[in-house]
Amino acid sequence: MRTLLIGLLLCCSGLAQAAVQTREMPYTGADGTQLIGYFAWDDAITGKRPGVIVVHEWWGLNDYAKRRARDLAALGYSALAIDMYGDGKHTEHPKNAMAFMNAALANSAVAKARFETGLELLKAQPQTDASRLAAIGYCFGGKVVLDMARQGVPLAAVVSFHGALVTATPATPGSVKAKVLVEHGAADSMVKPQQVADFKQEFDKAGVDYRFVSLPGAKHSFSNPGADAHQGHGLDVGYQKEADERSWADMQALFKQVFAD
């Protein structure tokens, strides 16, 4: 009996352990920059599954971006948080974040190449169904995934969470292949109302299949529980649980739609 009880306890303990696995994946950008991705998958799932790219906030490839990759893996996706800055660097200071972001966006061709290199890395993983791909991004990353959609990167869907909406490469009729979801905080002072209006006009004119969700009372960075810690830097940001949960649910609904068998 004692042996049986021990066996049951060990079995239950094993079942309680997370099936999500992760590993860092060094790779090289087209411009020679050394990059470090963070790959997550559920090893309890057999066979290939849709792949999702995660693009970090302007802070860089930090724990929050990695957590979102794990969250996606737990939902049954093959997820890769890519590195848009190089060497996996990240910061907690807005001045450094601004410098990193501006450098990454200085050359749109390089930015696109870094994204596409990450996408090819995700496609090459044995867990990934390379025919079913999507991308999500936060803040800076939201802008990146929207720009990738604008530039015709072959993705089934892109989701922007409190992302910047301005662009140097507007969508044109037929350029966007992905279904687009924008989760925007209605109280986001970093994205001006005119920018929202211009974005909607741009996507309407281009005939993009998109949905724009304005989340009541939500500020910039509404999805990140660590956002409140940055208020000390004078940033008008803040976490909102309701907006976080609703936007994540919206994303899941879109993915179920585009990845339906």
Image: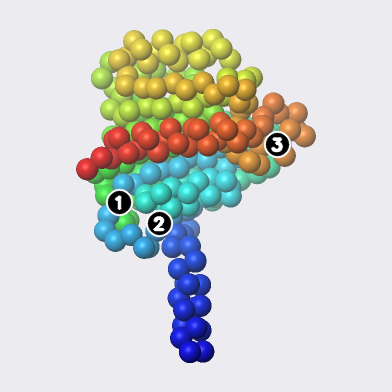
Query: Of the residues shown, which amino acid type is indicated by label 3?
Result: Asp
**Considering only order in the chain, which callout, 1 or 3, is on the residue closer to the N terminus?**
1
Would you name the residue on which mark 3 appears?
228
Nearer-the-camera pick, 226 or 93: 226
Residue beneath disc 2: 41
Earlier-in-chain disc, 2 versus 3: 2
Q: Amino acid at mark 1?
A: Arg
Relative to the observer, which residue lies in front, 112 or 65?
Answer: 65
Crowding at dot 1, Cα within 10 Å, few <14 / some 14-19 / many 20+, comes out as: many
Q: Which residue is mark 1?
A: 49
Name the quadrant of the C terminus.
top left
For the residues labelled 2 and 3, the Cα–Cα distance comes to 29 Å
Please tell me in which quadrant of the rendered image residue 218 appears: top right
Q: Residue at x 52, y 40 (%)?
A: 56
Do the numbered discs 2 and 1 sit on residues whose CB atoms are within 8 Å? yes
In the picture as drawn, the residue positioned furthest to the left comes out as 261
Residue positioned 49% across, 32% down in the render: 247
